[in-house]
Image (cartoon, helix red, strand yellow):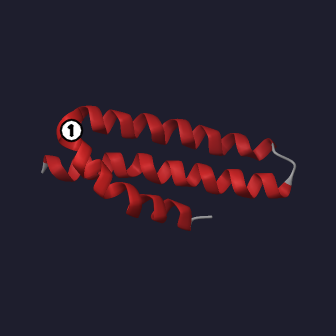
Amino acid sequence: MYRAFEVSALIFSPIVGLMLEKLGRKNSIMIGFVVTIVSTMGLACTEFIEDDSLYLYLSIAIRFIQGMGDMWVQTSCKRLF
């Protein structure tokens, strides 16, 4: 489940780098924080899922989205310095 985070970070890092000039650094950081917060809240809500396979697949998908949000923040912050 935790590999989905790294895989999405690997995929989205170059995409975020290309989109960074269009959106601006501050907007990119805000997008990343919003995506990370919403996906973390979604992952917290998976506690109430009783079906094991649904829980697994949904958790992997949400971790993938968390990795995407984290890449928005990390790539944008690295470009600031």
Residue 2, position in %: x, y? 57, 65
Q: Residue at x 54, y 68 (%)?
A: 3
Residue 12, placed above or below residue 46: below
* Res 32 → quadrant: top left
Callout 1, which amino acid?
A: Arg
**Residue at horizontal 30%, vertical 38%?**
29
Choose between 73 and 24: the one closer to the eye: 24
State the residue in front, 8 or 40: 8
Q: Residue at x 57, y 54 (%)?
A: 63
Task: Where is residue 31? Give x, y as percent.
Answer: 37, 35
Q: Secondary structure at mark 1?
A: helix
Q: Quadrant of residue 52 in the image?
A: bottom right
The quadrant the N terminus occupies is: bottom right
Q: Which residue is mark 1?
A: 25
In x, y percent, where is residue 9?
Answer: 41, 59
Q: From what the image shows, is residue 78 above or below residue 31?
A: below
Tell me which residue sits at (33%, 33%) in the image. Answer: 30
Other-residue count near label 1 (Cα within 10 Å), few / some / many at <14 / 14–19 / ≥20 = many
